[in-house]
Amino acid sequence: MAELHSSIVALVSLASGIASNHPAMGQCQLARLRHQGISEEQIAAVIEIARHIRDESAQKLDVAFDEVAYPQGQEGSPSTEQAVTGENCCSSTASGQTCC
């Protein structure tokens, strides 16, 4: 198996920690990335994408739960817009970063 550069490993660890709400909050990875000279703009992009994936996942889980909790036609059932959003493969972040 090919070995990944340590900066790639740190970026992946940072992103997965954020996306999974890991309590360590990626502090070790941030320090390592800065020490390796990774730009603040690149770090910010990774953080934005990871947060977007985390938030999108939570929204999709909410839609799936609402579909079970509130069958169509019942008060409080998810809107069509929510259901469509929940079906998307992926979307861009607020600043236009792609997560795919």
Image: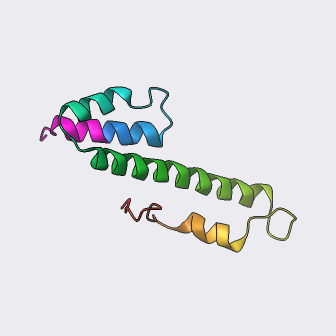
Q: Residue at x 55, y 67 (%)?
A: 87
Residue 23 placement (x, y as % from top left): 49, 27
- Coloration of the structure image: rainbow
Residue 63 placement (x, y as % from top left): 67, 59
Residue 94 placement (x, y as % from top left): 47, 62
48, 13: nearer the viewer: 48
Q: Residue at x 66, y 53 (%)?
A: 62
Q: Identify the residue at the far front of this view.
A: 40
41, 5: nearer the viewer: 41
Magenta span contains residue 91 = no
**First to last magenta residue range:** 1-11
73, 26: nearer the viewer: 26
Q: Residue at x 48, y 39 (%)?
A: 20
Q: Is residue 58 left or right of residue 26?
A: right
Q: Residue at x 54, y 51 (%)?
A: 55
What quarter of the picture does the C terminus occupy?
bottom left
Q: Is residue 77 above or below residue 2?
A: below
Magenta span contains residue 3 = yes
Which image quadrant is residue 34 in? top left
Which image quadrant is residue 83 in? bottom right
| Tally of numbered discs | 0
2, 20: nearer the viewer: 20
Q: Is residue 26 left or right of residue 51?
A: left
What quarter of the picture does the N terminus occupy?
top left
Q: Is residue 73 above or below residue 48?
A: below
Residue 76 placement (x, y as % from top left): 83, 62
